[in-house]
Amino acid sequence: ISYKIKLMMKTTLTFFYDRCWASMITTRYNLVVRLLSTDIKDPSSGFAHEYAEIIGNNQNITKALEALKNYPDIINYEIIRRYEDGQRVLIKIDLLLSQCPLFKVMHIFSKEKSFPIIERVKHDGFLEWSMDINHKRIIKRIITKLKKMGIDEVNVRFKKEKDLTSKSFYILKIAYERGYFDVKRKITLRRLSKELNIPVSTLDTMLRRSVKKIMDEVVK
């Protein structure tokens, strides 16, 4: 019997989208924009709620908010909170879905049962998407979608985790089934090593490495 777990690839996409309001105020007004969340409860409505913090000089924040009033693709915006220091505001923006690259690719993830995108705006206005994917074909589909929106240059970085091999997973599965991981162990490491015909020290190392790989994916 052979088993294999396909671990996710840590993937980062970096690109510039000239219609992004967050990129505009970051570069034009020297501000920091933290994109907190995008709420798309009803796609048929044609817009999404985007929540963000704008951080920086108070005068520049005022100018940026004024610019957003007439910015394309923004239906409306609301100031949720002005912080006492005057250097930070929390806003909610009603954004047209037709011009939102994030929305255009999210359905790819729902079909592929992958993980959501973490989006941030860099100091130079470039957007950075971080995600976990299980196949490079997903990235190809995302890049195709972005190119249709006029985004020609997309930088892609992969940090591929090693797969948990068939042998490692088989041994881990046997140890689990024999009760090695139970709160009150049903089998000792020494007894398990005899059954599997693997030296105690080698078996201990294999189990620790396998558990760490799985925990790395779960905890991160």
Image (cartoon, rainbow, N blue to C red):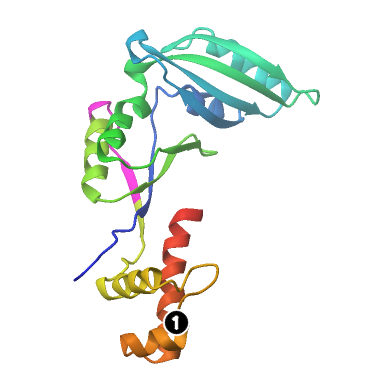
Which quadrant of the figure has residue 78?
Answer: top right
Residue 134 vertical position relative to residue 115 in the rendered view, above or below: below
Q: Residue 189 appears at what percent x and percent y?
A: 46, 84
Write down the quadrant of residue 139 in the picture: top left
Was residue 155 drawn as part of the magenta stretch in this picture?
A: yes
Residue shown at 34%/15% (left/top)? 43
Residue located 25% across and 50% down the image: 135
Q: Position of residue 85 (x, y in %)?
A: 80, 26
Judging depth in this view, the residue of 131 and 77 nearest the camera is: 131
Report the span colored magenta: 148-156
* Quadrant of the image containing the N terminus: bottom left
Q: Is residue 25 above or below residue 141?
A: above
- How many dots with numbers? 1
Quarter location, residue 19 = top left
Residue 4 falls within the magenta-colored stretch: no
Q: Which residue is mark 1?
A: 205
Counting other residues with Cα less than 10 Å from the Cα at mark 1, is it few (<14), some (14-19), or many (20 or more)? few
